[in-house]
Image (cartoon, rainbow, N blue to C red):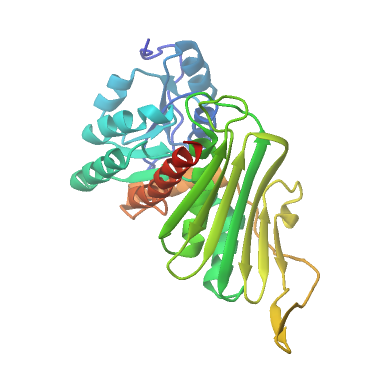
Amino acid sequence: MIPAESDAASPPRSTPGLPRVAVVGAGHWGKNLVRNFGELGALAAVVDPDLQTAQALAASQGAVARDLDAVLADPAIQAVAIAAPAPLHHRLAKAALQAGKHVFVEKPVALTLDDAADLIQTAETAGLTLMVGHLLQYHPVFLRLKAMVEAGELGRVRYIYSNRLSLGKIRREEDVLWSFAPHDISMVLALAGEEPDRVTASGACMLDEAMADSATVQLAFPSGRRAHVFVSWASPFKEQKLVVIGDDAMAVFDDTQPNWDDKLMLFRQPIVWRDGTPTVVKGEPEPVEVPKGEPLKAECSHFLECVASGRMPRTDGAEGLRVLRVLTRASEAMARDRS
């Protein structure tokens, strides 16, 4: 059942001049979007099949629970943020765009390349914003790391690798590649500045024969750079680590570090050739200063700014399509590997 509008909720708290946003999906991640758009003063409504959940969550931010059709028909709501299951992304985003709403959709933008291209074309034709929720591209630490790479502080980047491991949450509607890897692939592509010309992948189905719970993706780029992404929800420990290796230095973004000042470390350990032999010049790790900030708050603010100004989002539909191309190629490679 799709919830009707709740009359019991108080009028939405709003900040004048900000676009009004309805969040579609009040589950594990949707509740975080509700909180952030609410704290930013942009939340208008919450939509979820569970009416009680939608009403309670909306009320916590001074908003209302509404039916999706009512949201799409309301000219006072300019944008929709979608945190529904991935198989619904295309249908919900397409309906919102056709209703004249700007759209923020959680990763992946869609499950097929054709559906992603359809959303991009629909948004472009209507002159609307389409933004994909690749959260880590809004993390202050990743942005500092990306700036360091672009400024040449690591020298020529040779290799990038990312590990995203934990014990659960185990999903049944999508495998670990589609659940975990979009974030890492998005970061790798942003750092590489190019798309890979070769993608290989392998997976392991330990808990469910039909669902990979661990996967490794290898990427080779036209420039000669290499990268790999390892994801698993069957790990005894949690790890969220991105490593960038350059000719002059290496950098590590470790998001599991409890101390913010330890999340980005620089290792000035160049490899030099002496008498025809490669030698590592070791140095002590140096913490890189990064101003604190909540990534999701920054991502939501970016979406509102793009809707208000018409500027292109950092993670627009085209960026989402690039990530989806790699995911699709990796998924196909995993299927070949299992056969």
Q: Where is residue 6? Give x, y as percent.
A: 41, 13
Identify which residue, 268 or 336, lies in the foreground.
336
Residue plotted at (67% across, 36% down):
166
* Among the 4 quarters of the image, the one containing residue 204: top right
In the rendered image, the vertical position of residue 55 relative to residue 188, given as above or below: above
Q: Is residue 37 left or right of residue 161?
A: left
The quarter of the picture where the N terminus appears is: top left
Q: Is residue 97 left or right of residue 333?
A: left
- The answer, for residue 107, to whether it is visible in the render is no
Q: Where is residue 77? Give x, y as percent.
A: 32, 32
Q: Where is residue 52? Give x, y as percent.
A: 49, 11
Residue plotted at (53% across, 30% down):
29
Q: Is residue 289 left or right of residue 76?
A: right
The total number of labels drawn is 0
In the rendered image, the vertical position of residue 85 relative to residue 147, given as above or below: above
Residue plotted at (53% across, 63% down):
226
Residue plotted at (41% across, 47% down):
329
- The answer, for residue 332, to whether it is visible in the render is yes
Specify the farthest residue to the front: 339
Identify which residue, 330 or 26, lies in the foreground.
330
* Among the 4 quarters of the image, the one containing residue 16: top left
Q: Where is residue 2? Give x, y as percent.
A: 36, 13
